[in-house]
Amino acid sequence: MSGLDDVLCGGLVRGRIFLLEGSPGTGKTTIATQFLLEGAAAGERVLYITLSETEDELRATGASHGWSLDGVEIYELVPPENLLDENQQQSLLYSSDLELGETTKRIFEAVERAKPDRVVLDSLSEIRLLAQSSLRYRRQVLALKHYFARQQITVLLLDDLTSDAHDKTVHSVAHGVVRLEELAPDYGSDRRRLRVIKYRGRRFRGGFHDLAIETGGVRVFPRLVSAEHRTRFSRDVLSSPSAELNALLGGGVQRGSSVLILGPAGTGKSILTLTFIATAIARGEIAAMFVFDEERSLLIDRAKGLGLDLQAMIDKNLLVLEQVDAAELAPGQFSERVRHCVEVHGARTVVLDSLNGYQAAMPGESALILHMHELLQYLNRQGATTFLTVAQHGLVGDMRSPVDVTYLADTVILLRYFEARGRVRRAISVVKKRNGAHEDSIREYRIDGGGVTLGQPLTDFQGVLRGVPTWVGKGPDLLEPDA
């Protein structure tokens, strides 16, 4: 499991005992089976000791992922037949001490027969119930630990936390502890994540990491740390075919920077980003666009009306266009997709349209800010130019954004509606640019079959950004409608 190995900074140390805990349904059995299958593929002997599931259930679970468990020896530890006898259950002779001792003895016998290199014990909850006290349970776990240590066996203990979620007995005994959690959002599919609580003598990636149970096993998405992905590149200025847009941006957009496009719905934020994508592809670069709010096929059809053939770009492997369902995708999965486009496909222009949809995948605004900070820093350090869009609430007058990320972006482009000569018009301005000067004027722009056309600065108007400007000049220089 490459994702989990990344979180553990290499994997599990051979000959040690590890604890994998989590409530039922978080993926413990699937991860444990993958752990044994990896060992079997490397030529090791592996053993799965189950106290809670039957062998048929384990093999059925493996078949659902397309796995063959022929290389995995499964030992189903069922209670002795006399425990099922009603008269024996009522007897005072067969106490929990005898049952616990019998269980431990049979575990050792199974290990002696199989002589495995890797062992999974599923689950500790059964042993905890038999022990009945914390002291006896700790002694039993210590006995198991010392026995496996003498045999130089790597052991993965599973605990479903059904007996006592606050019992930390095994935490102090195990060499490493990994906890799995399941979250149920108000809408959308369940989210799962893991956290390494402890790993003796080893560095590991702290914090929560998203995971998903897919056909084929569990995938772990390590938390993105932008500081680990520094690269060298030339921060040259990337211009567009529009002289007016270049003038507004102070010559263009610097490579490895981020551009935030703000504006109400319908002002052309997506169309403007498509202009930058077409310019990047014309330079011979690869671009990637992640669409949260619009249907992928509808965007392709809409772009054709502007003279942009996105499908041809996709067919030539120049554009990666992905539809993102925020309700079904964890933030870590999305970061993994972006990284794949940059590191595998070689994308140098990345568009996120829009942050409103991305916010839906986040548990809160603070989490969105942190995710966006790491993602933008990662893209910047990879030399990728990033364009983000945010749909503001309202059409004219005061505008409100669902989340303020303007301080994260290097350049902020503001789009507005305004009324003049009985028509609804659009205005564009650059309100922020970290790495150089920019034009401080406000220009009118038009979207038509030729794409985005910018006009001259609106020097004869005052109050354009408020939506209802005042004419203070002698002759407004506005874009006239097409004939």
Image (cartoon, rainbow, N blue to C red):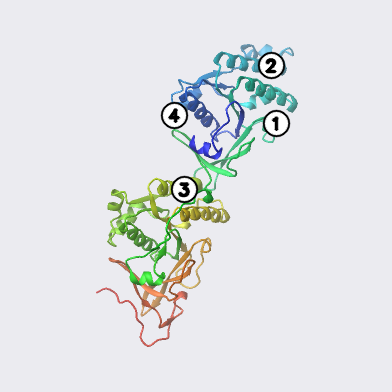
Q: Quadrant of residue 250?
A: bottom left
The first of marks 4 and 1 along the sequence is 4
Query: Is 105 left or right of 316, judged from the image as shown?
Result: right
Residue for badge 3: 334
Which of the image's four quarters has the C terminus? bottom left
Tell which tag, 4 or 2, sits nearer the viewer.
2
Residue for badge 1: 169
Residue contact at pointers 4 and 1, CB within 8 angstroms: no
The first of marks 3 and 4 along the sequence is 4
State the image coordinates of residue 78 (x, y, percent, origin top left): 59, 17
State the image coordinates of residue 98 (x, y, percent, origin top left): 70, 15
Q: Quadrant of residue 438?
A: bottom left
Badge 4: residue crowd in 10 Å (few <14, some 14–19, many ≥20): few
Query: Is 127 left or right of 213, judged from the image as shown?
Result: right
Looking at the picture, does residue 7 appear above or below residue 437?
A: above
Q: Which numbered tag is attached to residue 101?
A: 2
The first of marks 2 and 1 along the sequence is 2
The residue at the point 64 percent across, 24 percent down is 126
Residue type marked 2: Gly
Q: Which numbered tag is attached to residue 56?
A: none
The residue at the point 59 percent across, 44 percent down is 207
State the image coordinates of residue 334 (x, y, percent, origin top left): 46, 48
Residue type marked 3: Phe
The first of marks 1 and 3 along the sequence is 1
Residue for badge 4: 64
| Gap in angstroms between the C-alphas marked 4 and 2 | 35 Å
